[in-house]
Amino acid sequence: MKKLIAGAAIALLAAAPALAGEIVIELTRDSGESFTLVLDTTANTASVNGSTPEAYTWDEGTNELCASSGLCVTFAEASQEVGSSTTYTTNEGNAGTATLVAFSE
């Protein structure tokens, strides 16, 4: 019985981030370097490769996401379909492909 309860608790904890509202995007630069961008849509924070989350803003008109640190990423398209890809550019001069890995509300 303890194993069953522990297993259920682990399953609920694993599902908790999805319930919070999370978007996971893989950004692959043209140079081949990849980053994982996680957006917590409930807390309105973003983190890259597990870094400390920071506040972000999203402009639907321009598909631009800007972190409080000043880094901005502009996506060619915005999608909520997992597996979809689009190109992106940053205000630091980087460019590449963004792929939506996970989306939950």
Image (cartoon, grey):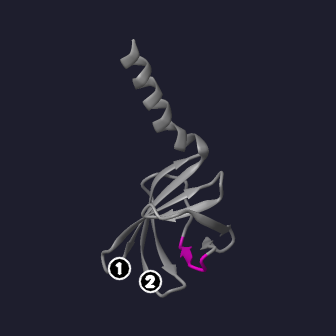
Q: Given the current orientation, which residue lies at the most extreme front position?
A: 2
Res. 44 image quadrant: bottom right
Residue nearer the viewer, 36 or 83: 36
Q: CA distance from mark 2 to mark 1?
A: 8 Å
As drawn, 25 above or below 97: above
Q: Tag 1 or tag 2, which sits nearer the N-term? A: 1
Determine whether the residue tagged by mark 2 lies in a helix, strand or loop.
Answer: loop
Say whether residue 75 is magenta. yes
- Name which residue type carries label 2: Asn
Residue nearer the viewer, 60 or 57: 57
Q: Position of residue 15 (x, y in %)?
A: 49, 37
As drawn, 9 above or below 97: above
As drawn, 10 above or below 5: below
Q: Which residue is mark 2?
A: 94
Q: Which residues are magenta?
A: 69-76
Q: Which residue is mark 1?
A: 30
Q: Are marks 2 and 1 in contact (CB under 8 Å)?
A: yes
Q: Residue at x 60, y 66 (%)?
A: 54
Q: Position of residue 94 (x, y in %)?
A: 44, 83
Q: Given the current orientation, which residue lies at the most extreme bottom position?
A: 93
Q: Given the current orientation, which residue lies at the most extreme top position?
A: 1
- Name which residue type carries label 1: Asp
Residue nearer the viewer, 19 or 99: 19
- Residue 15: image tag: none
Q: Position of residue 105 (x, y in %)?
A: 61, 45
